Image: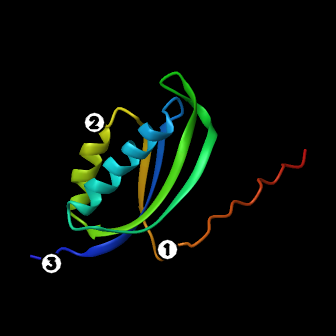
Amino acid sequence: MEKDKNRLYEGMYILNATLSEDARKKAIEKITAGITQRKGQIHKMHEMGKRKLAYEINGKREGFYYVIYFSIDTPHINELWKEYHLHEDLIRFMTLNAECVKETLEFQPLKQPAY
């Protein structure tokens, strides 16, 4: 059987926009605690602020965006996802394999199509 691998991940989390600052901190602490309790390591967290959602999700049009770079043994990802589904303040989440930790996040403007 192959040994579990500790890999680098990039997680994006969208929290409910109606949360107070204290409630947001507690929600993020709950997410990061889930990682560290499974012997994972948080490398970098980017708070992207309040942004409009691309589409309405459960009646919500805005959310607070966070990007967290962390490393953890691969089998623990499924456990984290199960936890995230029970997190009432978490609107959406996505976890991807990452090649490196980005120190800054920059988004390029979308190109307008030529008609």
Residue occupying the point 42% across, 61% down: 96
Is residue 49 placed above or below 102 in the rendered structure? above
Choose the circle earlier in sequence order: 2 or 1.
2
Is residue 14 placed above or below 45 in the rendered structure? above
Choose the circle earlier in sequence order: 1 or 3.
3
Mark 2 closeness class: few <14, some 14–19, many ≥20 residues within 10 Å: few
Q: Position of residue 7 (x, y in %)?
A: 32, 73
Question: Is residue 91 in view from this perspective?
Answer: no
Under mark 1, the amino acid is Val
Under mark 3, the amino acid is Lys
Quadrant in which the N terminus appears = bottom left
Within the image, what quadrant is residue 108 found in? Answer: bottom right
Q: CA distance from mark 2 to mark 3?
A: 29 Å
Residue on which the image places disc 3? 3
Q: Are marks 2 and 1 in contact (CB under 8 Å)?
A: no
Q: CA distance from mark 1 to mark 3?
A: 24 Å
Rendered image: mark on residue 86: 2
Is residue 79 placed above or below 62 in the rendered structure? below
Rendered image: mark on residue 64: none
Depth check, front residue: 14 or 30: 30
Secondary structure of residue under mark 2: helix
Residue on which the image places disc 1? 101
Say whether residue 102 is left or right of residue 92: right
Residue occupying the point 50% across, 57% down: 67
